[in-house]
Image (cartoon, helix red, strand yellow):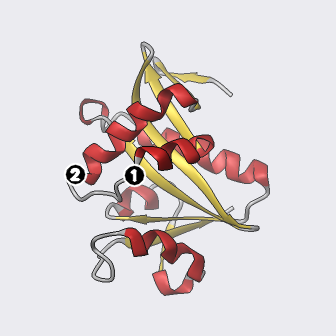
Amino acid sequence: MKKKTSGYRFQKATIKDAKTIHTLVNQFAGKDEMLPRALNEIYENIRDFFICLEDGRIVGVAALHVLWEDLAEIRSVAVADNYQRKGIGGKLVKQCLREARGLGLKKVFALTYHPGFFRGLGFHDVDKNSLPQKIWGECLKCHKFPECNELAVIRIL
């Protein structure tokens, strides 16, 4: 599923992309903008990831992680600093939403410090406590738990 738009190519990640995904995601985690990911976690979930390439170089990533029969999370949306504000993040999220629909999912949520980004893509705010308990597995790993100020957003498909 390769898609080229505006000089960028969007596709599913492969094993060879894991180390670059790890580096990009953890650059943002280092700025406290998202949850850090261990390299083994990237490998274990490589099929969740979409990447954006420019001239063969990964410039953006996003993942769709299925949690239940009707629910998935968009996570690890990261675009290299010099590629931001070019629509790459939005296109990566749209790839995730397209896959979610194809899988028959009914709802997709994200936990984010940038809810405006997701609102612009049709998500709306939701109380974190209204989400299934299963989502808290990731939260328990976070050094900010339980004092996290991420907001939950959801989109009904």
Determine the image quadrant of residue 135.
bottom right
Compare residues 79 and 136 and report the one nearer the observer: 136
Q: Determine contact: label 1, label 2, CB under 8 Å.
A: no
Determine the image quadrant of residue 13.
top right
User: Which quadrant is home to the C terminus?
Assistant: bottom right
Residue annotated with mark 2: 30
Is residue 127 visible in the rendered image? The answer is no
Compare residues 131 and 91 and report the one nearer the observer: 131
Between disc 1 and disc 2, whose residue precedes?
2
Q: Residue at x 33, y 37 (%)?
A: 23
Residue 139: % across, % down? 42, 73
Point out which mark residue 123 bears.
none
Residue 58: % across, % down? 41, 26
Q: CA distance from mark 1 to mark 2?
A: 11 Å
Q: Amino acid at mark 2?
A: Gly
Q: Residue at x 58, y 51 (%)?
A: 64
Residue annotated with mark 1: 37
Q: Pick out the residue farthest to the top.
A: 55
How many residues crowd around disc 2 within 10 Å: few (fewer than 14), some, or many (20 or more)?
Answer: few
Is residue 68 visible in the rendered image? The answer is yes
Indicate left or right for 34 with 157 as reference. Answer: left
Labels in figure, total: 2
Q: Is residue 155 above or below residue 38?
A: below
Residue 43: % across, % down? 53, 41
Q: Amino acid at mark 1?
A: Arg
Residue 35: % across, % down? 35, 59
Q: Pick out the residue farthest to the bottom.
A: 129
User: Which quadrant is home to the N terminus?
Assistant: top right
Give SS at disc 1: loop
How many residues crowd around disc 1 within 10 Å: few (fewer than 14), some, or many (20 or more)?
Answer: some
Q: Residue at x 35, y 33 (%)?
A: 86
Q: Residue at x 63, y 50 (%)?
A: 97
